[in-house]
Amino acid sequence: MKSALCKVLHPIAGRPMILYVIDALASSGIDRIIVVVGHQADEVKSCAGDSAVEFVVQEPQLGTGHAVAMARRVLEKFGGSILVVPGDVPLIEAEMIQRFRSFHEGRGSRLSVMTCTFDDPSGYGRVVRNDAGEVLRIVEERDASPDEKEIREVNTGIYCVESALLFSLLERVSAENAQGEYYLTDIVEEAVETQVRVHGFSADDPDQVIGINTRADLARANRIVWGKIRESLMLNGVTMLDPSTVYVDHGVRVGPDTVIHPSVTLCGDTRIGGSCTIEPGVLIKDSVIGEGVKVMLGSRMDSASVGNGATIGPMAHLRPEARIGRNARIGNFVEVKKTDFGDNSKAAHLTYLGDAAVGEDVNIGCGTITCNYDGKKKHRTIIGDRCFIGSDVQFVAPVEIGEGSLIGAGSTITKDVPPRSLAVARGKQKNYPLRKGQLPERSGEDRKS
């Protein structure tokens, strides 16, 4: 991956890939899930800590066979079959796991391996069979001969093995290979040498068993998951004008009759109601959007909430803890942060509202700013119901404007304003005649005309 981040923590559709694997196992009816961790173990534990899993630490990391062997101490008394699944096969689904288990149990198999046939098997271990179609061994690509590299049937890294057999085979595995590691794949050849038949289960959906080894693999997995999410939303009444350009992460919910335009990103813990319109270039993260909301071109929301019937944008920015009321309007180039903005209120353009409470039926004029930071602390501005704020007003917080008040354009308000008052805070205009030498020169064209 060429990354400072542990591979299994890389997100797919906004969610760490290991959580997809854990969910698939849990949904398939697996009784006990053990996660073997090594590199960035604490971070992986933190990520998966809410799941009903156990952790085993592999230290040092000496290969996949060594990783599975580390689980022996917590499975010594277990007498059933052990399903081994890599943490970097995030698209595997519960139904595929169930079919694999049924295949293993139905044949009375002691060791089964899940395989798949790829058009391009590059990067995967190849499955070598004899003329009778029996699995003989799995050879990693680095160790494969030219003929073996032509094989298109690959190892998915998923096994079902009788517990006692698994650990006895791992004791026979050596690290004499190109990487100097203990390969889990070697248990197949060791089993054949001890007269244990290996059964191969062929997965019929290559997408489910792709492994993530590069950023290109990660991008492919994202496309697959995003495609499934889009399909599900459209089947449940959401319109997407150009689905391939819409990115909706795992867990996002969108109500029916909402129309999503091209180049929209919906991520995190986002909830969008029905009958909304999301115009092009919008990004919504960790936010709650009510019914019938219109989010216009190029707007961004992060940890915000918007009431029913509101209009946002174009080019608006709702920052964390922005709470916009019903039928309110946040217009173009308006930024709102940690502010309660009341029902039916309007801030149509070019305004910053931070650390504020704005009442209902308030009109905020163009260029208004809440000056909330004094260099050390943030302070709050409170604007009561039915106030009218003229253009280019600065509120130097902390300050409170009583309900029904009017603030004259161009005012800098530093003191509280009582209810139903007119506040004007600007210098008196004076006009002075210019003397002849002070008049601006006219151009030649002006003189001719």
Image (cartoon, rainbow, N blue to C red):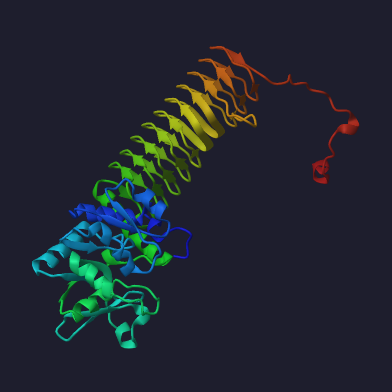
- Quadrant in the picture for residue 416: top right
359 up-or-down from 44: above or below: above
Q: Is residue 432 visible?
A: yes
Is 134 positioned to the left or the right of 425 in the image?
left
Which residue does the image show at 44% across and 25% down from the upper left? 342
Q: The N terminus lies in which quarter of the figure? A: bottom left
Which residue does the image show at 35% across and 52% down from the upper left? 241
314 up-or-down from 61: above or below: above
195 up-or-down from 37: above or below: below
Counting from the top left corner in percent of width and height, residue 245 is at 39, 56
Counting from the top left corner in percent of width and height, residue 296 is at 44, 42
- Quadrant in the picture for residue 154: bottom left
Q: Nearest the camera: 333 or 54?
A: 54
Is 178 positioned to the left or the right of 232 in the image?
right
Q: Nearest the camera: 11 or 53?
A: 53
Which residue does the image show at 47% across and 43% down from the upper left? 300
Q: Is residue 202 visible?
A: no
Counting from the top left corner in percent of width and height, residue 53 is at 28, 51
Q: Residue furthest right?
A: 437
Counting from the top left corner in percent of width and height, residue 310 is at 40, 33
How many marks do you count on the picture? Answer: 0
Q: The C terminus lies in which quarter of the figure? A: top right
440 up-or-down from 118: above or below: above
- Quadrant in the picture for residue 428: top right
Which residue does the image show at 60% across and 27% down from the upper left? 391
